[in-house]
């Protein structure tokens, strides 16, 4: 049973009577075990019975595949890939595909579980799934990536489909990757199946607004949190770690709201300017040189320093476990808005809560992507085409509603934001699982 510790400070302003579960003193960075710690805490608050806990904390299906890929030099390289379906009680599995040298099965299992909770927080009728391939996409040519993607798609084909499990882009995959998967699936079944993936190019059934949906959704929840914490977004200082789909788009959208982007980074390091960095110039510079490092008008900084610099809003938008026991005491942001999945460890969460720093949790803060993925899937299934204005309006409504449902849950259970979002999500999935009953 979790015991609680009292944080102080501005967390109260977003309605959280201050209580946070205390966890074991040694820090475990295994993402799946972290996902399970977060789940256990919510299950404890909801007093779920042990059998139901077992069902919800374990993935429903795990598939590991070998992906023999002909490389451009004529040699064959065998990559390993995964697809994990964590829970499909509320609808088909949904979740991205990650290409990265450090992908592990436990990482994919964690990301799949977080997808289950994310779709439930947003109340979209999907379950949670995730895929990953251990590879080094930065060192692969486009033709190598295409061959690997098509073979991976054919290997996971028996368990994906528009009513089974619908992949989407994640780290180092994009709309082109989704187009190859959609084409491979369609060629195999003999007709075009748009709804098998989301995040596709608009020309083959992708949705307007999908490419920027994760960042736009983040902006909507940050706006709501800023209202409650009485932080004017205009002029607020923002530091962003990770300058890809989520991070670079967030930089652009925050700047459009007149927030000041004071630091950006990617794998090669960071750049800073207290007077503000123009994200459009940073995007153009990165397109030319492959990194933000060295862009004119900003000085160099490390990724570590970026995380602990003084700012109003810190946006981790790269990978897991960047805010940990080791740097949580040094974080100076007032709001941490998690564009990345799993950037904050449970230990760091506890420290940030005690210090009154509001963490907008990944399962809410970056859920704009899956929400517009749902809109894309609905359009595909119904043969509809919504314009960007309609998509963004629906996204805003969904994100704002989910934010306030989270705040309501925080107030009811006297917990900080991540616990509020988890209790909301786990409660919904538990209810769906219970009402369906156990087969056979
Ligand atoms: P991406 O591949 O487009 O960009 C990743 C960025 O992170 C790149 O700029 C890369 O240089 C940077 N990066 C990688 N490792 C880093 C490190 N160690 N330090 C600093 N920067 C580093 O990926 P993305 O789609 O923007 O995803 C980023 C995060 O957002 C991931 O955690 C992903 O799961 C999450 N996310 C993405 C989406 C989406 O729709 N793309 C949706 C929800 C969550």
Image (cartoon, rainbow, N blue to C red):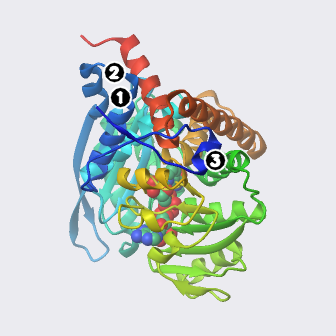
Residue 342 visible in the displayed image: no
Q: Nearer the viewer, residue 150 or 378?
A: 378
What residue sits right under mark 2 in the picture?
48
Which comes before the other along the chain, label 1 or label 2? 1
Query: Is 292 situated above or below 37?
Result: below
Please give the name of the residue rendered at 39% of the width and 32% of the height, measured from the top-left corner: 42
379 sits left or right of 82 in the view: right
Answer few, some or many: residues within 10 Å of disc 2's Cα (few below 14, many 20 plus, some between 14 and 19).
some
Please give the name of the residue rendered at 59% of the width and 82% of the height, measured from the top-left corner: 288
Residue 67 visible in the displayed image: yes
Residue 238 location, quadrant: bottom right
153 sits left or right of 317 in the view: left
What residue sits right under mark 3 in the picture?
217
- Mark 2 lies within 8 Å of ligand 1 (Cβ measured): no
Instruction: Measure the alpha-carbon separation of dots 2 and 3.
Output: 31 Å
Mark 1 element type: helix
**Percent of width and height locating residue 191:** 48, 36
272 sits left or right of 321 in the view: right
**Percent of width and height locating residue 360:** 55, 48
- Tell whether label 3 touches label 1 (CB within 8 Å): no
């Amino acid at each position: 049973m979790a015991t609680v510790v009292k944080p102080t400070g501005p967390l109260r302003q977003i309605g959280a009577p201050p209580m946070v579960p205390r966890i074991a003193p040694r820090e475990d960075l295994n993402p799946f075990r972290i996902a399970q710690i977060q789940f256990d805490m919510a299950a404890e608050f909801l007093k779920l019975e042990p059998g139901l806990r077992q069902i919800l904390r374990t993935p429903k299906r795990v598939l590991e595949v070998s992906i023999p890929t002909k490389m451009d030099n004529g040699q064959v390289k065998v990559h390993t890939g995964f697809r994990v379906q964590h829970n499909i009680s509320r609808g088909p599995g949904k979740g991205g595909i990650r290409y990265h040298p450090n992908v592990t099965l436990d990482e994919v299992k964690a990301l799949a579980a977080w997808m289950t909770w994310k779709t439930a927080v947003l109340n979209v009728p999907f379950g949670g799934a995730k895929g990953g391939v251990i590879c080094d996409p930065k060192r692969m040519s486009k033709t190598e990536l295409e061959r690997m993607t098509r073979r991976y798609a054919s290997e996971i084909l028996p368990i994906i489909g528009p009513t089974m499990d619908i992949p989407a882009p994640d780290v180092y995959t994009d709309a082109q990757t989704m187009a190859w998967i959609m084409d491979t699936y369609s060629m195999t079944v003999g007709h075009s199946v748009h709804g098998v993936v989301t995040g596709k190019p608009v020309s083959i059934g992708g949705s307007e607004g999908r490419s920027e949906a994760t960042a736009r959704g983040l902006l909507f929840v940050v706006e709501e949190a800023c209202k409650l914490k009485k932080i004017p977004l205009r002029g607020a200082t923002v530091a962003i770690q990770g300058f890809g789909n989520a991070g670079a788009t967030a930089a652009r959208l925050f700047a459009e709201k007149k927030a000041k982007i004071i630091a950006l980074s990617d794998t090669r390091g960071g750049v800073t300017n207290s007077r503000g960095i123009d994200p459009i110039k940073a995007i153009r510079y990165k397109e030319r040189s492959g990194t933000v490092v060295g862009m004119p008008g900003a000085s160099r900084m490390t990724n570590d320093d970026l995380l602990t610099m003084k700012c109003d809003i810190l946006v981790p938008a790269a990978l897991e476990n960047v805010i940990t026991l080791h740097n949580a005491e040094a974080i100076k942001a007032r709001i941490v808005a998690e564009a990345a999945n799993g950037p904050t460890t449970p230990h760091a969460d506890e420290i940030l809560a005690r210090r009154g720093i509001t963490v907008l949790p990944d399962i809410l803060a970056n859920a704009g992507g899956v929400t517009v993925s749902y809109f894309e899937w609905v359009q595909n299934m119904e043969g509809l085409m919504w314009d960007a204005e309609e998509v963004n309006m629906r996204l805003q409504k969904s994100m704002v509603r989910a934010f306030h449902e989270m705040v309501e849950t925080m107030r009811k259970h006297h917990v900080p934001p991540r616990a509020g979002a988890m209790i909301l999500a786990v409660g919904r999935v538990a209810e769906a699982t219970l009402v369906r009953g156990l087969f056979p």
